[in-house]
Amino acid sequence: MKPIQTLLVATDFSTPAKRAEERAAWLAAEHDARLILLHNLSSLALQRLRERLLPGQDDSQAQLHAHYRDALQRLADDLAGRWDIVVTPQITTGQAHREISRAARENGADLVVVGAVGEHPVREFFVGSTAERVVRESPVPVLVVRREGHEPYVRVFAALDLSPCSSAVAELARRIAPAAQLTLGHVFEVPFEGKLHFVGASEEAIHRYRREEREHALAALHTLAEAMPMPQGLDIRVEHGMPDAVLPRLLGETAADLVVTGKHGASEIVDLLLGSMTKHLLREAGCDVLVVPPAPERKA
C-alpha cells in the first residue's frame, strides 16, 4: 500500500475542527508527511453578504478573505511549530465538501481528515454533515475525528464485509496505527433467515446454514490476517446478527478508539453512494471513523 505522504485537514475553526487538526498533525508527524490545512469560504454565504449586507463594498469582502487568510496562517504556524511538520495553508471558495474533495485530488492527498460536525451541528443533523458528504465524494480515505487527537490510536477495529475492498481496509487499519491492537471483525446475516421456516427449512438446516456462513467468514478473515504484517498481533471476531445492532457492541467490547471500514457495503440493498453500515458508523460510532474508498478499476 502507498505510504502516507500528504494529509489534508479541513478546518472551520470550530472545536470539532480543532480535534481534527490535532489528529492530522499527529499523524503527519508520525508518518513524516506534509499537511495541507484547508479552510473553505461558502460561496453562497459570500453571495448573500454581497447582495444584502455589503452591496457595492468589494473591499469588505477582500478584508474578510484577508482575515481568514491571516487566521489560517497563524494556525498553520502553530501546528508546524508544535509538531515539527510542514504545514501549507490553503483557502478555497465554494461548497465545502466539493472543495475539500477537489483539493485532495489537486494536492495528491493520501488521507483527508475532517471533524465529525462543523460549526452548525443542528443544521447538519437535518441535512447531513459535511463529513458525510466528503466521505461520499472523496477519492481517497477520509478520517472523521470525534475524539481528542494527542495520542496514538491504541485499539483499532476493522469492520469488514468480505468484499474486494476488505484487504485495503485491513491494510490501511494496520498502516494508520502500526502499534495498535488490531481486530478484524465481520458481522453476518443469513439471507432470508426470518423466512426460511415458511419455505419448509428445519431448525437444524437453518443452524447448519448459519454455521457454514460463520466458517466461511472466519476462513476469509484468517486468510486476510496471514497476508498482513505481524499477523500474530491480530484479533478476529465474527458475529451473527444485524450490523447496526452488533457493531456498536463489538466496538465497546474491544474498546476501539478507531474503526476502519469501506465506503460501500456488500449488500445489494444499499445507498447508491454510501453503504448502510458505513453510514451508520459515521452517525453513531463513538470513536473516530476511517472510511476507505474502493480501489479504482484498472483499464484493460
Image: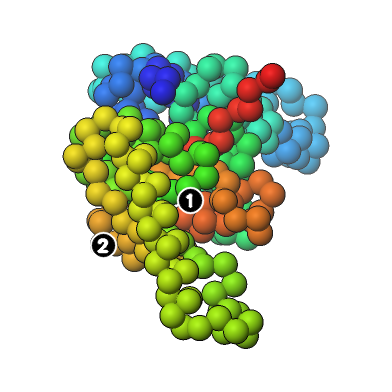
Q: Give residue 146's position: percent from left, percent from top.
A: 38, 48
Q: Give residue 33's position: percent from left, percent from top.
A: 36, 17
Residue 278 appears in the figure: yes
Label 1: which secondary element: loop
Observer-nearest of 213 and 255? 213
10 Å crowding of disc 1: few (<14), some (14-19), many (20+): many
Identify which residue is drawn at 45% across, 34% down: 168
105 sits left or right of 221 in the view: right
Observer-nearest of 140 and 35? 140
Q: Give residue 94's position: percent from left, percent from top.
A: 69, 31
Eye-nearest disc, 2 or 1: 1
Residue 24 sits in quarter:
top left
- Residue picked out by circle 2: 253
Mark carried by residue 193: none
Residue 131 appears in the figure: no
Label 2: which secondary element: helix
Ranked by sequence position, the earlier of labels 2 and 1 is 1
- Residue picked out by circle 1: 161
Q: Is residue 250 above or below residue 78?
A: below
Observer-nearest of 215 and 136? 215
Amino acid on which disc 1 is placed: Asp
Q: Is residue 183 above or below residue 276?
A: above
Q: Is residue 211 above or below residue 261?
A: below
Gap between marks 2 and 1, in whole Å? 19 Å
Identify which residue is drawn at 80% across, 27% down: 56
Amino acid on which disc 2 is placed: Glu
Identify which residue is drawn at 34% across, 23% down: 28
Q: Which part of the image, by quadrant, shows the N terminus?
A: top left
Q: Which part of the image, by quadrant, shows the C terminus?
A: top right
76 sits left or right of 81 in the view: right
Display coloring: rainbow
